[in-house]
Each structure stands twice: as C-alpha cells, then as structure tokens.
Amino acid sequence: MPDAVPVVALGRPVIFLGPPGAGKGTQARQVAQSYGVPHLSTGDMFRDHVGRGTPLGRRAKPIMERGELVPDDLVMSMVEERISRPDCANGFVLDGFPRTLPQARKLDEILGTRPNGEPLVVHFVVDPAQLMRRLTGRRTCAVGGEIYNIHDHPPKVAGRCDHDGGELMQRADDREEVIAERMAAYERQTRPLVDYYRGRGVLRDLDGMAAPAEVTRRIFGLLAAQPEKSR
Ligand SMILES: [Zn+2]
C-alpha cells in the first residue's frame, strides 16, 4: 500500500516513461487506483476493441494475430477515443504509451485541445546493467507462481520454491537475449521522448532502481507538486 495518500484530484494526464522491466506497470496501476482515474495501456485497449468487435478492433485483430505492430494511425485513433471518455476528465495514467516521437507529437496535439491537458511525464531512470541483472535473475515457481530472484530474493534451496517445493523456472520473457532486444528497441524508438518531453518542461526524473515502495512514495511526491507552466 502507498504510504502517501493523495488528497487532491490528479487533474491531468500522467505518462510513465521508462525501459521495459523498470516496474512502470505496477506503479502506474497503483497511482491510477489511488487517484481513482483510469490506467490506460494500449494492450488493454486493443483487447477491449477486439473483444467488442468494434471497427477499430476488426482492423487491428488480423494485424495482431500476425504478430505485427499495429500502425500508428490505428493506435492514435484508439487512444484519442479512449481519453475523450468522461472517466478521463479528471486525469488518467498512460502506461507504455506513447512509444515513438510521432505518437508523442500527435498526443500533444490531442491534449492541447483539452482543458488541463498538459501532461506530467514520470521518467524512470535505470542503470541498464543493474536492471538486466535484476530481470535475468527472476525465477517463477512452476507450481504456485511465486516469484524469486537468484540475486536479491533467493529461495532457501536453490531451484526450489520455499512454499511448495515446486521447480523454479526462468520465463522466456526473462531470458537475457529477449530483454536485450526489448531494451534496444526502447533505446531506438522511445528514448528520444525523454529529450522531447524534457524540452517541453513536463518531464520529471525518478530513480527507477529504488525499492518499489520508495519509488511509489516519490511518485506521489512528484504528483503532489504544482505543475509548472511551460506553454
Ligand atoms: Zn511455489
């Protein structure tokens, strides 16, 4: 549980920016829940549209089934529709979006037409080597799903779950080559957003390597601060 309970409305869009595996998703969900605003990820949006069989969903489905990247215009239409719903009027949290400069610029266009549309961008600063060590050290119990880390949170008996003795496995997503590829994609596509938002004066750096509870505490501190005018 967060130890700083927000007392005011979020009142603006908040964007969580940082490399894969930095813990953005968990923090974004917690912030959204604490402020009572929607937590938005494009993955959830696509699943929703595909599930409801909307025109957007029908266009996206075959692309997703082929494992290809959904084109920007489709992503943007979906995001624009979602953030124009009434539940986003008092702010929302974007997790894993925008991912590219064109998306960020288009999002700014959309937000620029809204009252309180100026976003706050929380940038998770990480040490890549330390993050890689943390992620490749993860092991998951094949029986109960408990999560361990061979470096920071090892089981009492190597390779065995403390609770049920289940075998500890490394998920395919936690393999070094998979993580390295996702990190490289982040550096190439998403890293430029750090400079873009910093130049706009809306970015705040956050030590993403701190303990999760401490990260949460600092995020609430950033959100409680008055927004600076930059436009
Ligand atoms: Zn277990």
Image: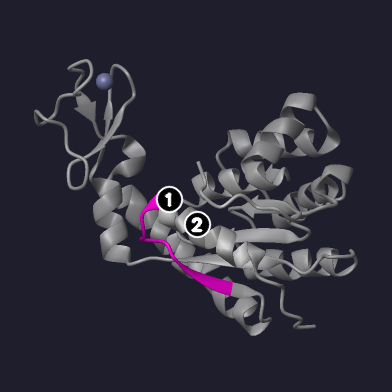
Residue 66 screen position, x and y as percent: 58, 37
Residue 138 screen position, x and y as percent: 27, 41
Mark 2 — residue?
Answer: 217
Q: Secondary structure at mark 2?
A: helix
Q: Which segment did they paint magenta?
A: 204-212
Q: Magenta span has 222? A: no
Residue 13 screen position, x and y as percent: 73, 59
| Residue ID at (76%, 81%) | 229
| Residue ID at (27%, 61%) | 130
Q: Secondary structure at mark 1?
A: helix
CB at disc 2 and ligand 1 closer than 8 Å: no
Residue 98 screen position, x and y as percent: 65, 60
**Mark 2: amino acid:** Arg
Characterize the local packing of mark 2: few (<14), some (14-19) or many (20 or more) Cα atoms within 10 angstroms. Answer: some
Mark 1 — residue?
Answer: 213
Q: From the viewer's perspective, tell me whether residue 131 is left or right of residue 59.
A: left
* Labelled pair 2, 1 in contact (Cβ < 8 Å): yes
Quarter containing ligand 1? Answer: top left
Screen quadrant of the C terminus: bottom right
